Amino acid sequence: MAPRLTRRRALSLAGGLATASFAGCLGLGDSPDPDGEAVESLPTPVQGDPESAVTVAVYEDFSCPHCRDFHLNVYPDVVSEFVDTERVRYEHHDFPIPVDERWSWAVAGAARAVQDEVGDDAFFEYAALAFEQQGSYSMDVLADLAGEVDADGEAVRSAAENDTYAPVLEADRSEGQDRGVQGTPTVFVNDEQVDLDSGESQFDAIRSAIESAES
C-alpha cells in the first residue's frame, strides 16, 4: 500500500535525494499566473449518482506517484463496486502540492480543458490516461491524449501551456486546505477523511467508510 505524499515527506525526500524530480515539492505551492484569458470557475468533475447521499471526494496531484498508484490500482475497484452501481457520488478534486512545479499544474489544467470541452466522462478517461503517462509528460503527450477522448488536442495544449485553468485548480486546492488536506491522495466519504494508512488496503478502508455512511 503506497503512503500518501505530504509536503513534509516531499521535503524529506528532497533533502535525502538531490534530484530534480522532487524540486517542485520544495516550493510553497504558489499557483501560476495565467498567460492570457483565464477560466475562473468550472463544476467539480463527478461520476456515479450525482444525487447520492454518499459522496466520495478524492484530492490528487497528477505528478504524485502515490496518486498514480491510487488511480490505477484502487480507483478502478471503487468505480466497479460503487460508481457504476450508482451507490455513490464520486468527485475529483485537484490538489497540486505541487510535486512537479510544471506538470502538477499543466496536466491538471489539460484535464480540466477536456472536461470543459467534452464533459465529465471524458475528464475521467483523460485523467486515467494521464496517470498512465506520469513520468513521461510533455505538451505533445497531453495533446495526443486529448484526441483519445475526442477533445481538441491543440486547445488542450494551449490551456496547459497558458495555465488557463489555474484559478479553478487553486480554488480546488484552497477548498482542500480548508478541509484539512495536507497530502495526496486524500479521500473523504461525506465529511469524514478516510485513513488510507490504517493498515488495511486503501480500497477496504474506502469501502468500510462508504458502508458506514450508507447505514
Image (cartoon, helix red, strand yellow):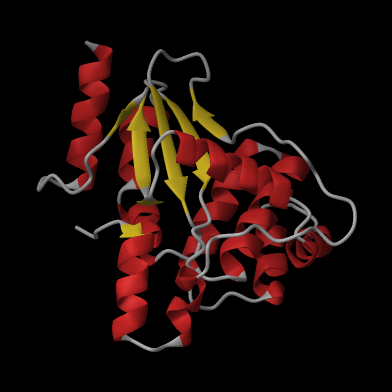
Q: In this picture, is 32 found above or below 182?
A: below
**Residue 41, percent across and down?**
74, 36
Q: Vertically, is 57 above or below 35?
A: above
Left or right: 86 as drawn, with respect to 144: left
Which residue does the image show at 83% across and 49% down from the upper left? 38
Screen quadrant of the N terminus: bottom left
Quadrant position of residue 29: bottom right
- Can residue 84 be seen by looking at this rendering? no
Please state if 215 lies on the left or on the right of 188 as rendered: left
Where is residue 172 shown, x and y percent of the image?
58, 41
The structure residue drawn at horizontal position 23% and vertical position 27%, both measured from the top left corner, is 209
Q: Residue furthest front?
A: 28
Asked whether the viewer can see residue 11, the reply is yes
Is residue 28 shown left or right of residue 188?
right
Residue 40, x across and y down, in percent: 78, 40
Q: Is residue 69 above or below residue 193?
A: below
Q: Please report the residue visible at 58 percent of the width from the left and 70 percent of the height from the top.
A: 101
**Front residue (pair 102, 205):** 102
Direction from residue 139 to residue 18 in the image, left or right = left
